[in-house]
Image (cartoon, rainbow, N blue to C red):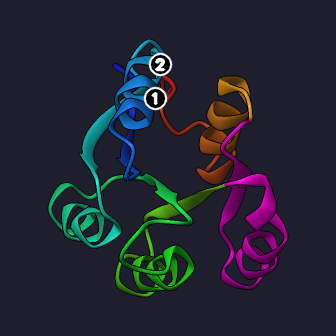
Amino acid sequence: MKSQKIKIAIVDNKAIFRESLRRLVEKEPDLGVVADAELNLDGIKKVGKHKPDVILMNRNEPFTDGLQDTKIVISKFPDTKVIILSMPSERTVAATLCEAWVCHNLCKNCSTEEIFAAIRKELPQGWGREKP
């Protein structure tokens, strides 16, 4: 049976970050990017349209509060897991709220291995891998 890829949406106001992360994600055989957006509100709309399994969302974007946007995603799309990407100085606040909202928080200066591990951890065991 063919394996199913984990569908990912990337939301960040820095194009270079989004594009670089997309390229790295797409090298992973069990991961695929289905949408990306510059702003969180556009990202939320794309979650509704593309139904990703995981959204990587910027904590600090210029026009909205990333944590409030996370709360919107969790309430409107409970099947989409949220991973907040934050700067080191924002990590404590984001981590506290993630615990309350059952999402994951990563520092933007983490390794790609940490991002991929978090994505895979957020989904049920065996998702994105061959089913027997």
> What residue did someone put label 2 on?
24
Q: Is residue 2 or residue 37 the one in the foreground? A: 37
Residue at 36% x, 20% y is: 1
> How many other residues sit within 10 Å of disc 2, few (<14), some (14-19) or many (≥20)?
few
Residue 44, position as x, y percentages in the image: 29, 70
Name which quarter of the figure residue 111 lies in. Answer: top right
With 117 as the anchor, is 132 left or right in this view?
Answer: left
Q: Is residue 98 magenta?
A: yes
Q: Within the image, what quadrant is residue 75 found in? A: bottom left
Percent x, y of residue 5: 38, 31
Residue 21 circle label: 1
Q: Residue at x 41, y 69 (%)?
A: 62
Q: Nearer the viewer, residue 131 or 69?
A: 69
Q: Position of residue 61 (x, y in %)?
A: 45, 65
Residue 2 visible in the current orientation: yes
Q: Is residue 47 above or below residue 94?
A: above
Of all residues, the one furthest to the front in this rendering is: 62
Q: Gap between marks 2 and 1, in whole Å?
A: 5 Å
**Amino acid at dot 2:** Leu
Q: Tell me if label 2 and label 1 are in contact, CB under 8 Å.
A: yes
Q: Is residue 57 magenta?
A: no
Residue 38, numbered circle? none
Element assignment for label 2: helix
Instruction: Please state if 92 lies on the left or on the right of 67 as rendered.
Output: right
Residue displayed at 45% across by 15% down: 29
Residue 4 visible in image: no
Question: Which residue occupies 41% across, 51% down?
Answer: 12
Q: Amino acid at mark 1?
A: Leu
The span shown in magenta is: 87-109
Q: Magenta segment, principal secondary structure?
A: helix
Q: Vertically, is 17 above or below 24?
A: below
Q: In front here: 126 or 51?
A: 51
